[in-house]
Every structure is written in structure tokens, then in C-alpha cells.
Amino acid sequence: MLGDGVQGLPSDMWALGWICWEIMTGKFPFEELVTEPPIICRVVQGELPAIQDDGQLSQIKELCSVMSDCWISNPVKRINAPTFRRKISLMPSTAPSSSTAGDAKVRSAALLQELGTMYHHQGNVGMAEEHY
């Protein structure tokens, strides 16, 4: 949008990546900056949040990948809406559970159900059965 000022689906996909980031982190992008010019400079220079290093987001690698696809600087190469929808629909809709002592994961019934459904949709019956 900054290059030619045209808004369209690619700029909507960019914004959708930020919406995902805000929902998952509970933070606004660049909240440490108080005016728009420094924010614009960071975006133009490609200085986006290190989502792979974020404690909450690092557990959801596929979502991190989709968010990164939303932020590709070249609008032509940016993820499109049908691909975004397909990738999101294959993800569990329940957040990962935290680990307990000894790194044993405690998973809620809702998460196990979502994981089983996800694997079933991917055609991986064996993994689906492990989660039901």
C-alpha cells in the first residue's frame, strides 16, 4: 500500500496477519512506539516482530508461518484469502496447554478433540485415533 497507495486484498491480508498477532499476544503492534512515523519506518525496513521467538506464538508454528505469509513485503507473493482459510481450517482452534513438571503435557479434552479432528481432515487416521 505504501508503494502505490492502492488498497486491496493483499493489504487486507497484511492486516489479517496483524489481527492474528494481536489476538494471540494480547498486544498492539509496536505498542512501545507512540507516533506513526517510527512504526512506518520499521514496517518499510522489514522490522516486524520476531514471532518465532514469542513464548505464546512459538507453540503454534503453523500459525506463525501463516502470519509470516501475510507479512511478505511483495503483495503479489503474499498469501491469498483461499490459501489462508485452508491453512487456518486445518489448525486446532484450542490453544496449546502448558507443560507440567517433567515436561509432561497436560492437554484438555477440547484440545485433544481438535487435534484428532485436524489429523482426520489431513487424512492421518493413525494420529487422529491417538487423540480421540
Image (cartoon, grey):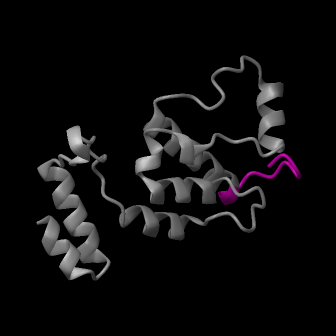
> Does the magenta-highlighted stretch encompass residue 105?
no
Looking at this rendering, what residue extends furthest in the top direction? 34
Q: Nearer the viewer, residue 50 or 114?
A: 50
- Which residue is at 32% across, 78% downward? 122
Looking at this rendering, what residue extends furthest in the front direction? 102
- Which residue is at 68% across, 58% downward? 10
Dividing the picture into quarters, in which one does residue 47 lie?
Answer: top right
Residue 102 point in image, percent of width and height: 22, 43
Residue 98 point in image, percent of width and height: 27, 40
Q: Nearer the viewer, residue 98 or 66?
A: 98
Q: Image check: 118 left or right of 33? A: left
Residue 58 point in image, percent of width and height: 47, 47
Q: Nearer the viewer, residue 90 or 13?
A: 90
Q: Image check: 9 left or right of 107? A: right
- Which residue is at 62% across, 60% downward? 69
Q: Which residues are magenta?
A: 1-10
Q: Quadrant of the C terminus?
A: bottom left
